[in-house]
Amino acid sequence: MKNIAFVSLLFLSLPALAQTTSGTVYYEEAIKLEIQLPEGADEAMHAMFPEKQTFGKMLVFNSAESLYKDVEEGEDNNTGTWTGESGGANIQIKMFRPENLTYKNLDADEMVEQKDFLSRKFLIKSELGNLKWKLVKEQKDILGYTCQKAELQDTGKVVVAWYSSQIPVSNGPDEYGELPGMILQLDIDNGRRTVTATKVVTDPPKEGLIEAPKKGDKVTQEEYDKIVEEKTKEMQQESGGNVIRIKRG
């Protein structure tokens, strides 16, 4: 009789030990904004701008592929609008956030990013396996998942990740991953950009939901960086410096 009771208890505990290898992780991403106003701008204009921009993202994943993108439900997630008064005039500021996608194929060690810059789309293809992490003996709980700390090495950014082996998929938001578990929180450059999981759904994604982006001009990362740099300088010269610049973390 004791043996039967033990076996029953063992089977009851199995669902709690089950690990997630497909589903959707919802994140809140927050980016600090550095506002550079034209010379002579008053304090009222400075006060109109927010200190950070916050929006929802989602990582749809299985054991082999993932797609990181904007949340699909709710209000428009790509804009921010602020109104105020400066110099006796009413001013409305509307800020658009680019619609970027990040696709990963873990089996093929491949990543495809779709980046939106000045209404022009670009496709950047690169290899995975380039992130060098240092695992730290520090843990914390995120959404009921036990997470381990990791720090990115040999890079110009200060990146701290918290990942959980209870979701045994080497993945995470945006270009980050390559750890022994899913990344549920990121801190980049001491809070300039943070990404924190708000919900984990373990239902398998619908077929066809995870696909590599195909729209955009194919460029390398170096070519894209050069385009952004040259276009930014061009806009500054055309404006004669009389332009509001917003730098996202």
Image (tube, rainbow, N blue to C red):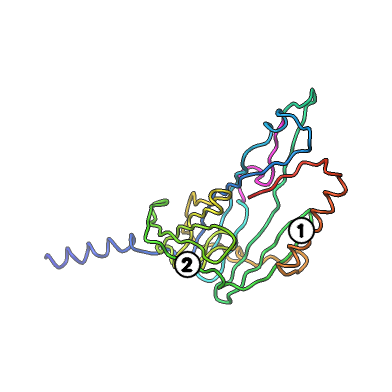
In the orientation shown, which residue stands out farthest toward the top? 88
The circle drawn on residue 83 is: none
Q: Residue at x 45, y 60 (%)?
A: 163
> In the image, is residue 227 part of the stretch drawn in magenta?
no
- Residue 17 placed where, x, y %? 33, 63
Task: Give the residue drawn at x 42%, y 61%.
Answer: 164
Q: Position of residue 181 (x, y in %)?
A: 45, 65
Residue visible at 48% across and 61% down in the picture: 151
Q: Which mark is residue 228?
A: 1
What's the distance in space between the residues labelled 2 and 1, CA to CA? 30 Å
Q: Is residue 164 above or below residue 52?
A: below
**Which amino acid lies under the numbered mark 1 shown in the image of this protein?**
Val
Residue 31 position (above or below residue 106) = above
Q: Secondary structure at mark 2?
A: loop
The residue nearer to you, when weighing 203 against 197, is: 197
Which residue in the protein does label 2 denote? Answer: 179
Seen from the viewer's position, the closer of residues 122 and 237 is 237
Residue 162 coordinates in the image, percent (x, y):
45, 57
Q: Which residues fall within the magenta stretch?
A: 72-83
- The answer to whether marks 2 and 1 mark residues whose Cβ atoms lie closer than 8 Å is no
On screen, residue 233 versus residue 98, left or right, reads right
What type is the residue that disc 2 sits on?
A: Leu
Work out whether 57 lies above or below 1: above
